[in-house]
Amino acid sequence: MQITVRQAATYLGVNESTLRRWIKERDLPVHRVNERLHLNAIEVWEWAVEHGVPASRSLLEEAQRSPEQVPPLSQLLETGGVHHDVEGEDKSAVLAAIVRRLPLSPEVDREFLLTVLDAREAMGSTGIGDGIAIPHVRNPILLHVDEPFVSLCLLRKPVEFGAIDGKPVHALFLVVSPSVPAHLRILAQLGFILRDSEMRELLARRAPTAEILARVRELEHRSTGSFPAPRAIRR
């Protein structure tokens, strides 16, 4: 649920100037859409709890009544693309190649994005096993995008990634979203799809895009249409 600066100030019991100061000085999460500032209700609630700022209970209740929805994974992959033959001799080179391929607007600082991805990997591998990784910063990658997307990158050759099972990585999913709730819902969808052995086999043999998307849609169709509620992921 997106709220305005005025609404956020009301929920937190302060004036708008104080809220804008918190955005600048205390890292209150905010998103700019079409030159206007918006905040996410759940993010504001989490920030308030973390910083000991009193917040109206109605803020969380309203956010829970209006959960943020995201498109199905198949649509997110169509937007972000399935990229074959991604080059790179090591983890850093692969991440650089991925960042170059992301469908981002010109104003996004790709070098900065690469820096935070490298820093995240230095804290601990995002390889989840079976040759798959989901690179992300400690907090989700939140960029000024109109819609979230997922880019799947299939590597030219497997790369050592320090994964939990010790296997080199051949497939990487990179999630870009405008808010934390959206990011977590997308991760829930990914977790559901990646439990499928046929899906993992398609990734291992770098199957054509059409085959991968067809399998994702088939799994979505078989599911009940709902995915697990998002949970905070700590790595």
Image (spheres, rainbow, N blue to C red):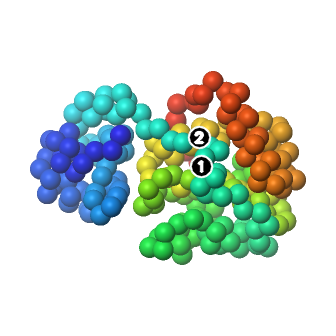
Of the residues shown, which amino acid type is indicated by label 2? Pro
Q: Quadrant of the N terminus?
A: top left
Q: Residue at x 28, y 57 (%)?
A: 37
**Vertically, is 89 above or below 135?**
below
Q: Is residue 127 left or right of residue 4?
A: right
* Rendered location of residue 3, percent (x, y): 28, 45
- Closest to the observer: 18 or 3? 3
| Farthest-out residue, top | 224
Q: Is residue 155 left or right of residue 192?
A: right
Residue, disc 2: 72
* Rendered location of residue 159, percent (x, y): 80, 64
* Rendered location of residue 134, percent (x, y): 66, 53
Q: Quadrant of residue 84?
A: bottom right
Say few, some or many: other residues with alpha carbon within 10 Å of mark 2 (under 14 / 14 to 19 / 20 or more): some
- Closest to the observer: 7 or 42? 7
State the count of labels: 2
| Element type at mark 2 | loop
Of the residues shown, which amino acid type is indicated by label 1? Leu
Q: Quadrant of residue 34?
A: bottom left
Q: Residue at x 43, y 38 (%)?
A: 68
**Vertically, is 154 above or below 230?**
below
- Closest to the observer: 83 or 168? 83
Q: Residue at x 45, y 46 (%)?
A: 180
